[in-house]
Amino acid sequence: MTPPAVPPHHRPGGGFRNPWVDHAVPGYGSLLKWMLVHRTTRPRPKDPDPSVFARVPPDFIPPRAPQSQLTVTWVGHSSLLIQLNGLNILTDPMWSERASPVQFAGPRRWVAPGIAFEDLPPLDVVLESHNHYDHLDAGTVRRLAQTHPQASWIVPLGLATFVTKRGARPGAVVELDWWQDWTVGSLRIAATPAQHFSSRGIGDRGDTLWCGFALMGANDRRVYFAGDTGYHPEFGLIGERYGPFDVALLPIGAYEPRWFMRYLHMNPEEAIAAFRALNAHVMVPIHWGTFKLTDEAMDEPPIRARAAWDAAGLPPGGYCQLAHGATLTL
């Protein structure tokens, strides 16, 4: 019997890769070039004062929204509280002060989390898109596992061990490959392709998978959370399989310099192109304004995204930029 074909995003012998671009992830030499050469020879745009980023009181519905209602609250970066199908869903939870393996160094928050940790409603589902420190935070995982033991954790292949070691119940953790799905109650959750990579140290690059998620409620409400991704050719197929989406949560920041970041993070124009391919009605920009990760000014991503949205002739009300803590209710 012929063995089943290895999916193109699986590395022969184990681990994962991007199937669309050879050597999509820059090597350590490129990282040193960026840090030691590019940043010392090219001036970076000036960042605004952090006070320009408003933090507003959230307006989600405690303890749970009605099954017919959909709310999205931006906690910051890629952390969002989604109320869908009567469930409370948290994406890429990050409540620590720094996106770093240590809390005395590394990118520091510009804005406090839009929802205080103690104010979170009872959680039903936690989604983790990949293992980078600004998305998978060990301290936050421990706190969530302790205070919300009833939650189901949906993670890409290889990440179950990380969250169970930090207190999540093994029976509540589900690993998914791209295009696989899982049901929690009447909510269907599918892992979707993303162009990115995984690593938390030296020598573990690509050992675990990365993904986005499509959320499909019984009342036909649908949400797409892209996770962390560069632009790739599967957005249209995601929309065909799992759309139409009421709202698409798409990353727009951490994209400069392009020679280093182009395959890892979409720039704002690419995010608008992804939205147009996805079969979605509303776009909420994420992955900006919280941590200083790359070289563009902190307030540049939404300015460029709005300009690209308008240039594409998309409906003015379809682009919904949230302040930290703000809630979109549909």
Image: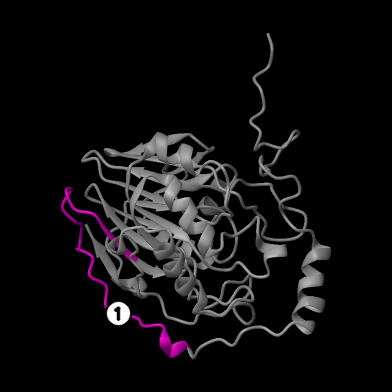
92 drawn magenta: no
69 drawn magenta: yes
Location of residue 157 in the rendering, given as x and y in whole percent from the top left corner: 57, 42
Whether 265 is drawn above or below 181: the answer is below
Location of residue 70 in the rendering, given as x and y in whole percent from the top left corner: 23, 54
Q: Is residue 120 visible?
A: yes
Q: Is 130 or 238 nearer to us in this picture?
A: 238
Which quarter of the figure has residue 186? top left
**Element on which disc 1 rests:** loop
Identify which amino acid the numbered label 1 is placed on: Val
Q: Residues within 10 Å of mark 1 (few under 14, many from 20)?
A: some
Which quarter of the figure has residue 306? bottom left
What secondary structure is the stretch in magenta mostly built from? loop
Q: Is 118 or 166 nearer to us in this picture?
A: 118
Q: Which residue is mark 1?
A: 56
Q: Is residue 150 visible?
A: no
Extent of the magenta region? 50-73
